[in-house]
Each structure stands twice: as structure tokens, then as C-alpha cells.
Image (spheres, grey):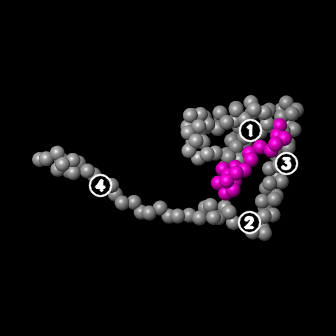
Amino acid sequence: MSVRKIAAAKVVTKPKLAPAKRTNAKKAAALPPTKSASGAIRNLSAAAEKLAVEVDRALAEGRTDVLTPDAIQALMAAACRSYSAQVEASGHFPLLAARSRVTSTDVMVTASGLLKAANLAVFELGMWQSWTGR
């Protein structure tokens, strides 16, 4: 048997997969909220801002246990997903306000924790940034 026939016999055909359904996730994210949804968004945003003020005040008083670990994880996950959705929808969205009380140490600790939680290395972040320009 020739080498070509042996190689052809070893070829395994892959099963055909159904085409992936296309969703309009970006389109849906870009649509303006309905009147009833915009009120709920304002209420949720106001509640988030109030929570942020209360947590910041507690930390300023030295109370580091103001949120449980489960609450911090839930808020961090929601904040990450919300920020990512904003960036995907608009292309640019500043993460922190210009006059934020967040220190560079806070940023490094949080970024390190996020990378570790997602099982990513700084090298992978650098590669992703170079590929996407973000």
C-alpha cells in the first residue's frame, strides 16, 4: 500500500455541526430602554451609588467587614459583567471617575485577584491587550 493510501485511510472525517444560531446580543444591548425599564435602571443605579457611598464610608471608619465575602463576589461579578457590556456596546467606557478614592494599590490588588479568579496570567492579559488594542 502506498504512503498516500495509508495517509488517506487514517483521515477521520469530523461530524458536521449545525450552524450556530446568530443572536442579536449587541443589537439588543444598543437598543434604548423602554419607559418602564428606564425607571428601573435609574432606581438600580441610584441604589448602587448609595451602596458605594455606604461601603466607602464604612471603610473610611476602618470597618473592613461591611460586606460579606459572598456579597463582594456577587457585586464584583455583576460589576465586571456590566463594565464589559458597556465597553462592548460603546467601545470606550472609563472604569473609574477622575477623582476616585481608589489607590494604585487598590487597583493592583483587585486586578491580581480578578486574574487569579479567572485563572489568567499577566502575560495573557498583555497578549489580549496587544491583540484587541484595549
Q: What x and y, as percent, mark residue 133?
A: 61, 45
Q: Which residue is mark 2?
A: 33
Q: What x and y, as percent, mark residue 121?
A: 57, 34
Q: Amino acid at mark 4?
A: Thr
- Give the residue displayed 83% in from the left and 49% down from the top: 49
In terms of secondary structure, where does tag 4 sit? loop
Q: Nearer the viewer, mark 1 or mark 2?
A: 2
**Labels 1 & 2 near each other (Cβ < 8 A):** no
Q: Amino acid at mark 3?
A: Lys
Please tell me which of labels 3 and 1 falls first in the chain: 3
Please tell me which of labels 2 and 3 falls first in the chain: 2
Q: Which disc, if any, is residue 50?
A: 3
Please tell me which of labels 4 and 3 falls first in the chain: 4
Q: Which residue is mark 1?
A: 68
Q: Nearer the viewer, mark 4 or mark 1?
A: 4
Q: CA distance from mark 2 to mark 4?
A: 47 Å
Q: Which disc, if any, is residue 13?
A: 4
